[in-house]
Image (spheres, helix red, strand yellow):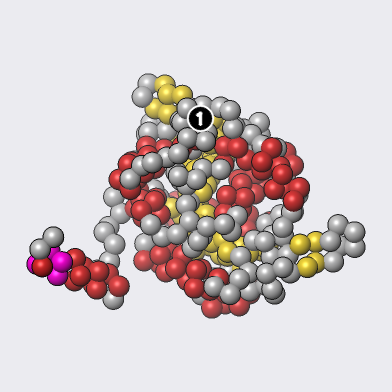
């Protein structure tokens, strides 16, 4: 790389960091004739290891239990965990007339994931960014989702290629951010919030996972990572606090066993679920007004 090329790249980085160069306008991928997805909701985090897939699963099961038609697009291509959690570990997706057909859980939730198209679920996904982005677009535009009220997108951690692809390719109505109660959480949440703002995607609110452990004998809550930071972090970024989750070994075991959908207790993240429903109702009203 000669000096002029280095100077050009440096200018581009400086422009992006100082907000002078905005992300490119979204180039949305159209739904196919076999898909009619009404609302797309992203579940994101600024870093890994905060239980984002579990939160995505809880929202999906809650919505399905309320009678909604729900799907999960597992956009965490290199670390897909949704199929095993939802009882689809040994299943594989198939295609009909050049369209992928998502697999369906016992409770009727449709799932598409990289692990459903690999020969073995433990095979590594050694794909570069453009190939990963192409897989996301295929899971959206070339998958026969049928009629869905909600498609939840389980995003990979961070603010990289996949997040940009999802926000630019799909009509995302909003995102739920997942965090944990640690000292660095505000910085990490800030990255996720700022990414959504740059892409003009509404932030529906913040869920704090792994907030506490409940003693099985007396019910006392113990806070292994220190006091909750949910309220102060939500206030700092002017977003809604949508609830907490504790560390539950039984629920973690259900994820490993593939019994999550059946074992999920009632009452978890009801406020977050309500917010997703209200967002959908609001978007329906807006779109209905535009059509009129």
Q: Position of residue 210 (x, y in %)?
A: 67, 61
Given the current orientation, which residue lies at the most extreme top position? 97
Q: Quadrant of the N terminus?
A: bottom left
Asked which quadrant contains residue 244, the reply is bottom right
Seen from the viewer's position, the closer of residues 268 and 79 is: 79
Q: Where is residue 188 in the image (x, y as percent from the top left)?
A: 50, 68
Residue at 45% in and 59% down? 158
Residue topped by disc 1: 120
Q: In this view, does 136 lie above or below 100?
A: below
Seen from the viewer's position, the closer of residues 139 and 202 is: 139
Residue 77 in view here: yes
Residue at 33% in and 48% down? 129
Q: Where is residue 253 in the image (x, y as percent from the top left)?
A: 72, 44
Mark 1 closeness class: few <14, some 14–19, many ≥20 residues within 10 Å: few
Seen from the viewer's position, the closer of residues 182 and 259 is: 182
In the image, residue 5 lies in the stretch drawn in magenta:
yes
Q: Is 31 left, or right, of 52 in this rendering?
A: left
Asked which quadrant contains residue 268, the reply is bottom right
Seen from the viewer's position, the closer of residues 268 and 225 is: 225
Residue at 61% in and 71% down? 182
In the image, residue 161 lies in the stretch drawn in magenta:
no
Q: Is mark 1 on a helix, strand or loop?
A: loop
Give the main secondary structure, helix, strand or loop, of the magenta stretch: helix
Q: In this view, does 130 lie above or below 196?
A: above
Q: In this view, does 105 lie above or below 4?
A: above
Residue 276 in view here: no
Number of callouts in the render?
Answer: 1
Q: Where is residue 43 in the image (x, y as percent from the top left)?
A: 52, 54
Magenta part of the chain: 4-8
Q: Is 185 left, or right, of 172 in this rendering?
A: right
């Amino acid at each position: 790389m000669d000096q002029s090329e280095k100077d050009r790249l440096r200018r581009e980085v400086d422009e992006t960091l100082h907000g002078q160069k905005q992300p490119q306008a979204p180039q949305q991928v159209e739904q196919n004739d076999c898909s009619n997805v009404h609302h797309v909701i992203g579940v994101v985090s600024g870093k890994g290891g905060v239980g984002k897939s579990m939160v995505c699963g809880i929202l999906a099961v809650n919505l399905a239990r309320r009678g909604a038609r729900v799907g999960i697009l597992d956009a965490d291509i290199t670390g897909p965990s949704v199929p095993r959690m939802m009882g689809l570990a040994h299943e594989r997706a198939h295609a009909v007339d050049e369209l992928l057909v998502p697999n369906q859980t016992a409770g009727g939730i449709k799932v598409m994931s990289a692990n459903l198209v690999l020969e073995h679920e433990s095979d590594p996904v050694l794909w570069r960014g453009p190939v990963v982005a192409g897989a996301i677009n295929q899971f959206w535009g070339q998958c026969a989702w049928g009629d869905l009220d909600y498609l939840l997108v389980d995003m990979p951690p961070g603010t990289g290629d996949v997040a940009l692809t999802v926000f630019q390719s799909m009509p995302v109505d909003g995102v739920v951010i997942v965090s944990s109660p640690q000292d660095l959480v505000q910085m990490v949440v800030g990255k996720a919030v700022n990414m959504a703002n740059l892409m003009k995607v509404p932030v529906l609110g913040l869920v704090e996972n792994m907030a506490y452990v409940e003693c099985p004998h007396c019910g006392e809550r113990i806070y292994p990572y220190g006091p909750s930071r949910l309220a102060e972090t939500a206030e700092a970024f002017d977003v809604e606090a949508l609830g907490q989750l504790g560390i539950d070994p039984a629920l973690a075991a259900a994820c490993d066993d593939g019994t999550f959908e059946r074992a999920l207790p009632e009452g978890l993240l009801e406020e977050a679920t309500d917010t997703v429903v209200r967002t959908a109702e609001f978007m329906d009203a807006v779109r209905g007004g535009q059509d009129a």
